[in-house]
Image: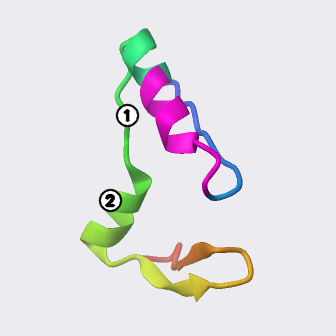
Amino acid sequence: MKVIVVTGTPGTGKTAVAKKIAQKKGYLYVDVNAIIRKYGLSEGYDKKRKTKLIDVKK
């Protein structure tokens, strides 16, 4: 299985780009934030970096 990961600064359009790539290529778009919420993987929020803190051991 091949995977494309789109990362970057918050608010720059990563989700829009990832969805467009998935649509054009016929790939599955996976919303990682939805997975984090569903399984309670967030351990807090880093205000400086404006991002969630994730417990990778979960």
Q: What residue type is labelled 2?
A: Ala
Q: Point out the tag, 1 or 2, that comes first from the N-terminus.
A: 1
Q: Is residue 36 above or below residue 11?
A: below
Q: Report which quarter residue 33 is drawn in.
A: bottom left
Residue 34: give its label. 2
Percent position of residue 15, x then y? 49, 42
Q: Report which quarter residue 28 is drawn in.
A: top left
- The foreground one among 37 and 50 is 50
Q: How crowded is mark 1: few (under 14 residues within 10 Å), some or many (20 or more)?
A: some
Q: What stretch is highlighted in magenta?
A: 11-20
Residue extending farthest to the right is 48
Percent position of residue 41, x then y? 40, 76
- The foreground one among 30 and 49 is 49
Q: Mark 1 and mark 2: span between their CA atoms?
A: 12 Å
Label 2: which secondary element:
helix
Q: Main secondary structure of the magenta part?
A: helix
Quarter in which the C terminus is drawn: bottom left
